[in-house]
């Protein structure tokens, strides 16, 4: 039986800190990384190991060491494994690893794992992995294939552990033939494997994805040092945003980012065809307090970003965000706040005054450009727009002549008072935003 890959290794925290560059130089076909174990315990080296593989283009899959003693627990372990690997958006093997320690742990909980339960747990784990679109794999040695697992599990690819010169069977996808290996870049002994079929791995097979990292689902914590230069990847494409763009301005290494926020910003970037500058995204509690951020701000959870787009007014950006279903939008003089809240709340300026709409579609009317300030003596179509909006909002009865005179100034003050904003008779970005809403 001819091996497709001959240099296949599996690693966990027990292998210590790996010199991945050295390992890559020595030649490696594929690696299996322990993503975690039990109830969502992530292997302490998994994220570093996975990031190194992404960086160096080393294809990899994952395995999850099980401490389940019910079918429901095993299925939840599959969810933990998928959550870990989805951060990298990989198409790859995801293996269920039930061993003697699993059985011993179950016994401490008063549960005896026999063939029926072991088979059901493996099937539940592999079933959930398969439904998620990954290659579900069952890890086992000869003893457990005889005593613990029914033949029905052979419908899933087998990762077979037998430390011998020959495997003694030919129906396995991988054969772990030794635990005594030595490879460059790794101190101590290494598990050695052969693979007898092609193993999918997005990190090796998708052109244009180098230097990127998956967003996963919901909020994920990244490392500025480890992941900062990587572009986010989602929906089968590399986005225009790097992890470091969402960092806290206090220099903290942790960077929390909601996948939904990246999706919103990419839609805005695609629509306007211009870079979206992130002024502020994730904030630590200390930094949020320093900048007088709101208590409970979504910035604290990586769910909000303050953005600006050169050549696009905050109102136009806010209107587009509204049109694509963004529920949290705040418009300020030079930027727009967007967040991933579930219930609608729109506001303008730091006062937090609520508004019902920003127009619902970009470019509503001939809205004055970013930073425009209209006051006594101003003339032109921006003033005409202002007069039209004042007539519509407060029935000002102004002549739409494009000349900012005394009556227009008084109408602006009247509108500002009704909106609860500073009544200085000057129509700056905030007043314009309220009028456009």
Image (cartoon, helix red, strand yellow):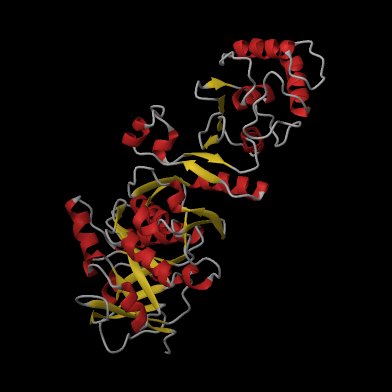
Nearest the viewer among 39 and 424 is 424
In which image quadrant can residue 326 be found?
top right
Q: In this view, does 153 lie above or below 344?
A: below
Give percent across and percent down for residue 240. 55, 55
In this rendering, the answer to whether 30 lies above or below 281 is below
Q: Which residue is drawn at 51% across and 61% down?
A: 133
Counting from the top left corner in percent of width and height, residue 79 is at 40, 53
Number of numbered labels in the structure image: 0
- Is 356 placed left or right of 73 in the picture? right
- Residue 78 in view here: yes
Between 197 and 292, the residue placed more toward the observer is: 292
Instruction: Tell me what residue is drawn at x 68 percent, y 10 percent.
Output: 410
Seen in the image, is 155 located left or right of residue 336? Answer: left
Decide which of 312, 65 is in the foreground and name it. Answer: 312
Residue 309 picture location, percent across and down: 60, 43
168 versus 206 height, above or below: below
| Quadrant housing the C terminus | top right
x, y percentage for residue 163?
Answer: 25, 82
Residue 153 appears in view: no
Taking the view exactly as shown, the residue that stands out farthest to the left is 108
Which quadrant of the rendered structure holds the N terminus?
A: bottom left
| Among the 4 quarters of the image, the one containing residue 404 | top right
Relative to 2, 33 lies left or right: left
Residue occupying image coordinates x 34% and y 75%: 21
Give the residue drawn at x 38%, y 47%.
Answer: 255
């Amino acid at each position: 039986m001819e091996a497709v890959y001959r240099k296949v290794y599996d690693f966990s925290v027990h292998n210590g800190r790996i010199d991945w560059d050295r390992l890559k130089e020595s030649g490696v076909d594929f690696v299996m990384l322990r993503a975690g174990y039990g109830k969502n315990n992530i292997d302490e080296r998994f994220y570093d190991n996975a990031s190194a593989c992404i960086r160096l283009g080393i294809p990899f899959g994952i395995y999850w060491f099980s401490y389940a003693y019910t079918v429901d627990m095993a299925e939840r372990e599959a969810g933990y494994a998928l959550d870990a690997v989805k951060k990298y958006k990989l198409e790859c093997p995801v293996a269920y690893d039930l061993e003697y320690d699993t059985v011993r742990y179950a016994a401490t909980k008063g549960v005896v794992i026999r063939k029926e339960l072991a088979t059901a747990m493996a099937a539940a784990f592999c079933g959930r992995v398969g439904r998620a679109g990954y290659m579900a794999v069952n890890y086992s040695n000869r003893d457990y294939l005889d005593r613990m697992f029914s033949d029905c599990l052979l419908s899933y690819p087998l990762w077979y552990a037998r430390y011998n010169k020959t495997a003694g069977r030919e129906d396995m996808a991988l054969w772990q033939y030794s635990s005594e290996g030595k490879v460059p870049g790794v101190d101590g002994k290494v598990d050695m494997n052969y693979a007898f079929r092609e193993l999918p791995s997005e990190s090796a097979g998708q052109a244009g994805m180098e230097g990127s990292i998956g967003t996963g689902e919901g909020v994920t914590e990244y490392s500025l040092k480890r992941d900062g230069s990587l572009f986010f990847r989602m929906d089968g494409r590399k986005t225009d945003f790097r992890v470091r763009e969402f960092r806290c301005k206090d220099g903290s290494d942790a960077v929390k980012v909601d996948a939904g926020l990246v999706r919103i910003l990419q839609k805005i970037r695609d629509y306007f065809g211009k870079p979206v500058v992130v002024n502020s995204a994730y904030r630590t509690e200390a930094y949020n307090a320093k900048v007088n951020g709101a208590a409970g701000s979504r910035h604290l959870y990586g769910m909000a970003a303050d953005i600006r787009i050169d050549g696009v007014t905050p109102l136009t950006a806010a209107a587009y965000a509204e049109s694509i279903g963004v529920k949290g939008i705040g418009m300020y003089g030079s930027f727009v706040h967007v967040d991933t809240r579930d219930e609608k709340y729109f506001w303008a300026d730091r006062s937090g005054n609520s508004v019902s709409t920003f127009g619902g579609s970009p470019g509503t009317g001939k809205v004055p450009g970013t930073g425009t300030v209209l006051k006594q003596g101003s003339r032109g179509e921006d003033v005409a727009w202002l007069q039209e909006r004042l007539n519509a909002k407060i029935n000002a009865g102004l002549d739409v002549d494009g000349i900012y005179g005394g009556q227009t100034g008084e109408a602006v003050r009247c509108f500002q008072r009704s909106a609860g904003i500073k009544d200085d008779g000057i129509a700056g970005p905030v007043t314009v935003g309220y009028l456009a809403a």
